[in-house]
Image: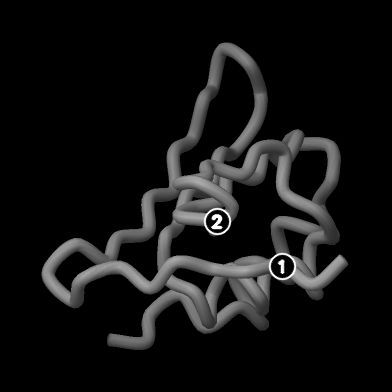
Amino acid sequence: MKKIYKIPNKAEIETTINVLYSEEKLTVYTNKVDLQKQLNKLLGEPTKELKIKRSISGSVWEISFKEKSKISKLLLKANIYEL
């Protein structure tokens, strides 16, 4: 099934990376459509997809500290800095 993404207002675009030391994982949230598609390819399906009706409004990935290759891909290959 093809995923349908809701394009956010430019002022509301955000990407958040949290380091949860006690849980030993990174969480990555974004509502930027291009980045969601890129992270789907690099990291696989998100842990959670936030939806408005049938459109995906944001995605969350949880990455364990043990998954070093995924963390490397996130930092080196994902275009998280693009404005």
Amino acid type indicated by mark 1 = Lys
Q: Residue at x 73, y 36 (%)?
A: 65
**Image position of 13 with respect to 20: above or below:** below
| Residue 11 coordinates in the image, percent (x, y) | 12, 69
Give the residue pinned by disc 2. Answer: 56
Q: Which mark is residue 3?
A: 1
Q: Residue at x 44, y 48 (%)?
A: 17
Please state the horizontal and vertical placement of residue 69, each as a whole percent of the image: 85, 60
36 is higher (above) or lower (below) than 17: below
Badge 1: residue crowd in 10 Å (few <14, some 14–19, many ≥20): few
Instruction: Identify the element where label 2 is drawn.
Output: strand
Q: Residues within 10 Å of mark 2 (few under 14, many from 20)?
A: some
Q: Say left or right for 81 vs 37.
A: left
The amino acid pointed to by label 2 is Ile
**Residue at the image position 20 percent from the left and 71 percent from the top:** 9
Residue, far front: 53
Q: Which mark is residue 72?
A: none
Residue 10, image x and y in percent? Answer: 19, 76
Would residue 72 be found to the left or right of residue 29 on screen?
right
Q: Position of residue 18 (x, y in %)?
A: 44, 38
Q: Quadrant of the N terminus?
A: bottom right
Can you say whether 21 is above or below 65 in the image?
Answer: above
- Quadrant assignment, res 71: bottom right
Q: Work out whether residue 62 or residue 36 is closer to the camera in this orientation and state it.
A: 36
